[in-house]
Image (spheres, rainbow, N blue to C red):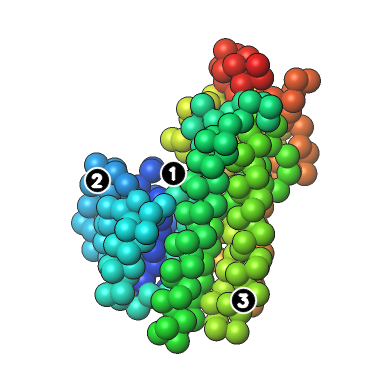
Amino acid sequence: MPDFLGLQGRSIIVSGAAGGGIGTAVMTMAARAGATVVAVGRSPENLEKYVPPLVAEGLSVVPVVADASTDEGIAAILEEARKGELYGLVNVAGGAAPATWMPATRVTREDWRALLTQNLETMFFLSQAVAAELKTRGRPGSIVSISSISGMNTAPFHVGYGTAKAALVAATRTMAVELALDGIRVNAVAPGVTETPASGTYVDQDAERDRRAIAMGRRGRPEEQAGAILFLLSELSSYITGQTILVDGGLDLKWTHLGADNTSLFLKDEAFRAAITR
């Protein structure tokens, strides 16, 4: 079968590969497309859960226990990636705990800095290191990062997260310009509401609400986000750089998921809803 994606034999770093959501789907799909995946996660237990079944399929997946938000973690990731034909990076590591939801008037410097570190700095400095390595080797490459619908629109009661994801889009555009003549493309995907273990902490099952809020009438699956990411990694998108693709099933087209109090209709816990608005 022809290698339409152009990933056969190339090394792809996936940061945040073992959370059971988008990163795990990207790791799986990239490996099945013939790439060698450097699967990065902070939890040895999670890597042990998701990587061995892929290796048992005969796929090339190498687990790396590292914290991508630190220089030491980045060094460990690059040490492993240098063993192969480094080509791609997918920045999935990020997110925000339920405790980070609150009115803008209550956000502390500590809250703000933690969210920007988790969702912006981690992406930028790992991308920087991979881009520098590709330039040193004179190789082309593709970097894809995860933004969010919250970075493309408003993020009521989640201003730090939304700001970090919006800044990620800006960093993507600027890096794309700087690296274009080196053959390194830089893009992003902005997911809408997606069924992942992380989102399950505050989003419940409500099919009728999903039909009202989302043009396609349902939430996304991790594999659907991974499909867009693989497209941006691949040769199929060889003339695309500096773009952020919104993968949200049309949620942004309707943007009706905010209630009268401006909180998300997807929040399942009324006590949580009350707490974040105080």
Q: Is residue 208 above or below residue 241?
A: above
Q: Nearer the viewer, residue 18 or 122?
A: 122
Q: Nearer the viewer, mark 2 or mark 1?
A: 2
Q: Amino acid at mark 2?
A: Pro
User: Residue at the spot x=48%, y=27% of the render?
Assistant: 201
Disc 3 residue crowd, few under 14, some 14–19, many 20+, Cα 10 Å = few
164 displayed left or right of 130 = right
Q: Find disc 2 in the rendering and name its residue.
A: 44
Q: Amino acid at mark 3?
A: Glu
Image coordinates for residue 12, horizontal then vertical, percent:
39, 67
214 displayed left or right of 123 = right
User: Residue at the spot x=76%, y=32% of the render?
Assistant: 256
Disc 1 residue crowd, few under 14, some 14–19, many 20+, Cα 10 Å = many
Answer with mark 2 or mark 1, whichever residue precedes in sequence: 1
Q: Which mark is residue 178?
A: 3
Q: Is residue 114 above or below residue 184?
A: above
User: Residue at the spot x=74%, y=25% of the render?
Assistant: 262
Q: Find disc 1 in the rendering and name its residue.
A: 21
Q: Quadrant of the C terminus?
A: top right
